[in-house]
Image: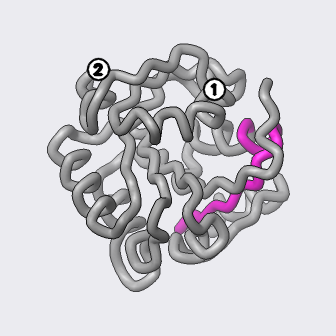
Amino acid sequence: MASLTGISVGFLGLGDVGRPVLRRLKVCGANVHATSRSPALRYKMARDAVNLYKAPSEVNDQVKDGIIFLMLSKQGLIDAFLNGPDGLLSNLASGALIVDLGQTSLDATQKYAKIVEASGAHWMDAPAIGSEQDAMEGRLSIRVGGRKEDFDRARPLLEAIGRDIKHMGEIGSGQAAVPTT
């Protein structure tokens, strides 16, 4: 496992696969900043010594122009975490990179990429396929759509959580490469 010491990462989405992905990044040395709207999940993650915040905008304050992972199962959740007075878009730093590890529709992926890029940041679709066990063992399969330079920037983090990682091309090509659920 490569060391991620000194890298600050944001993480939104602490579900069954998200929690082990976050833990894996932390074990590799990343300084992880996360949020969840669920008090029960915040409590579980606080026990793991994860830096937890009440709102996505507070994660931005910590990560600044770094990388923020989304591992959310529904488009409504992505909308909720991006928008509003305390959403990611409220204070997203220029140069930040949002990596969507969920399976998001192509239309939504294109929409989110345009919104994020209008703020001077970048979006990458990188659906992570696998089980909770795969996530714990760093064996997720990840197909990535987005700029090559963003892929190269995120690659060390992706390699900490996955084994089968391929850059497929432009925004949306990662989503297009995986079967829909």
The outermost residue toward the front is: 149
Crowding near the residue tagged with mark 2, few <14, some 14–19, many ≥20 C-alpha atoms within 10 Å = some
Q: Is residue 121 magenta?
A: no
In this rendering, would 27 be left or right of 77? right
The three-letter amino acid code for the residue at tag 2 is Ala
Number of numbered tags placed on the structure image? 2
| Residue at the (40%, 39%) spot, across then down | 102
**Residue at numbered disc 2:** 177
Q: Is residue 135 visible?
A: no
In depth, the one of 171 and 148 nearer the eye is 148
| Residue at the (38%, 72%) spot, across then down | 89
Labels 2 and 1 touching (C-beta < 8 A): no
Q: Quadrant of the C terminus?
A: top left
In this rendering, would 153 be left or right of 174? right
| Numbered range of the magenta stretch | 24-37
**Sequence-wise first label, 2 or 1:** 1
Residue 105: where, in percent of width, then height? Answer: 22, 40
Residue 63: where, in percent of width, then height? Answer: 63, 64
| Residue at the (67%, 37%) spot, across then down | 20
Locate residue 78: give its quadrant: bottom left
Crowding near the residue tagged with mark 1, few <14, some 14–19, many ≥20 C-alpha atoms within 10 Å = some
Find the distance from the CA under tag 2 to the CA under tag 1.
Answer: 19 Å
In depth, the one of 131 and 12 nearer the eye is 12
**Residue at numbered disc 1:** 159
* Label 2: element kind: loop
In this rendering, would 111 be left or right of 147? left
Q: Is residue 28 magenta?
A: yes
In depth, the one of 74 and 160 nearer the eye is 160
